[in-house]
């Protein structure tokens, strides 16, 4: 499948008060291989302009260099999202956008007013980033609402998951299969209830692997707990900081982000 292309909005649906589901069609989506936790980069054009894409290139670094070479006032803003579901027959995918509180970034601002006919760019999903799911006896999945789409796709593939998801309040729950523990923030500090619930969890006997995503500091705390207090091997923990408090996805990595990246590379 061509790693880059245009996406056209065909439907917009409010799934919960803070989640908008956008259906896109686009060239190549009918050939998209199925795998869980499928990530893609969405490219949002500057207001009032068509989206300008770098030329197609299978090499991600060359593609990114071409992206950076687009003049700043025409260069689309890039944000990471997850394929919530796919409909190969219609060459369509659904993406769930969390309308987060606080200052809306470009992706959230776009999702608030998304309308059929709107066009974005995409890079991915790229099978090169596909990760095998763990074969441990239990898969512990934990994350906030931004991780819900990925967790939903993981749950469609495994039946040994124990899941903890923290959302703003009860209205943000979505139907998911299996053992899901919902934590409602209800105004508490982001991640505090999730961390407490995972700390208190009695996990089944046998080997445990983990999949963690959401706000970067929360993910870091969860991972530290699993490694230090539960003795889960670092290599058994898939983790991704999806967003950072008070920093956009364009801001430079902090020293903690760089340390996380080094851990991921096994440095
Ligand atoms: C691999 C991957 C997959 C992802 N999948 C999804 C997905 O399917 N659905 C989804 O909604 N998000 C997903 N995210 C998270 C999403 O990319 C970020 O939330 C992103 O920052 C939103 O872009 P923005 O333009 O709205 O905000 P930005 O311009 O990046 O940030 C603006 C401000 O908003 C704050 N902010 C950003 N996100 C949040 C949030 N969720 N809650 C509270 N404050 C926030 C920032 O701290 C900053 O102060 C994913 C991220 C990654 C890395």
Image: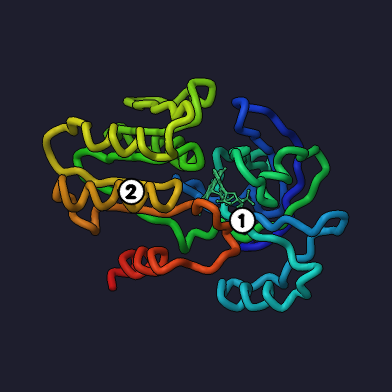
The CA distance from mark 2 to mark 1 is 24 Å
Q: For the N terminus, which image quadrant?
A: bottom right
Can see residue 87? no
Mark 2 CB within 8 Å of ligand 1 = no
Residue 200 horizontal/vertical position (percent): 21, 32
Query: Which residue is found at the position 77% from the left and 58% from the top?
Result: 45
Farthest residue to the left: give it. 205
Residue 67's label in the rendered image is: none
Q: Secondary structure at mark 2?
A: loop
Can see residue 210? yes
Please state if 35 lies on the left or on the right of 8 as rendered.
left
Of 115 and 26, the residue lying toward us: 115
When the figure is inspected, residue 42 is found, relative to residue 156, above or below; the finding is below
Mark 1 CB within 8 Å of ligand 1 = yes
Query: Which residue is found at the position 22% from the left and 38% from the top?
Result: 138
Residue 205 horizontal/vertical position (percent): 12, 35
Per the image, the residue denoted by label 1 is 79
Between disc 2 and disc 1, the foreground one is 1
Residue 105 horizontal/vertical position (percent): 66, 50
Please state if 42 lies on the left or on the right of 228 as rendered.
right
Residue 215 horizontal/vertical position (percent): 45, 48
Query: Which residue is found at the position 18% from the left and 50% from the top?
Result: 232
Upstream in sequence: badge 2 or badge 1: 1
Q: For the C terminus, which image quadrant?
A: bottom left
Per the image, the residue denoted by label 2 is 133
Of 130 and 68, the residue lying toward us: 68
Query: Which residue is found at the position 56% from the left and 72% from the top?
Result: 60
């Amino acid at each position: 499948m061509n790693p880059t292309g245009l996406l056209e909005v065909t439907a917009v649906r409010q799934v919960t008060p803070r989640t908008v589901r956008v259906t896109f069609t686009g060239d190549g989506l009918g050939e998209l291989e199925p795998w869980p936790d499928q990530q893609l980069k969405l490219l949002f054009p500057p207001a009032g302009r068509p989206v300008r894409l770098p030329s197609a290139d299978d090499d991600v670094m060359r593609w990114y260099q071409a992206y950076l070479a687009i003049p700043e006032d025409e260069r689309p803003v890039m944000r990471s999202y997850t394929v919530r579901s796919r409909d190969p027959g219609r060459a369509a995918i659904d993406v769930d956008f969390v309308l987060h509180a606080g200052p809306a970034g470009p992706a959230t601002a776009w999702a608030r007013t998304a309308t059929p006919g709107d066009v974005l760019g995409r890079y991915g999903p790229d099978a090169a980033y596909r990760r095998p799911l763990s074969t441990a006896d239990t898969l512990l999945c934990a994350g906030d609402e931004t991780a819900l789409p990925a967790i939903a796709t993981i749950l469609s593939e495994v039946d040994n998951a124990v899941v903890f998801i923290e959302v703003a309040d009860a209205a943000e729950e979505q139907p998911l299969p299996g053992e899901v523990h919902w934590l409602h923030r209800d105004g508490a500090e982001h991640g505090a209830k999730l961390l407490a619930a995972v700390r208190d969890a009695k996990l089944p006997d046998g080997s445990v692997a983990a999949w963690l995503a959401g706000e970067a500091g929360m993910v870091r705390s969860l991972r530290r707990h699993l490694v230090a207090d539960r003795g889960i091997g670092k290599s058994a923990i898939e983790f991704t900081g999806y967003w950072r408090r008070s920093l956009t996805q364009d801001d430079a990595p902090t020293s903690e982000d760089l340390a996380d990246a080094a851990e991921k590379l096994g440095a």
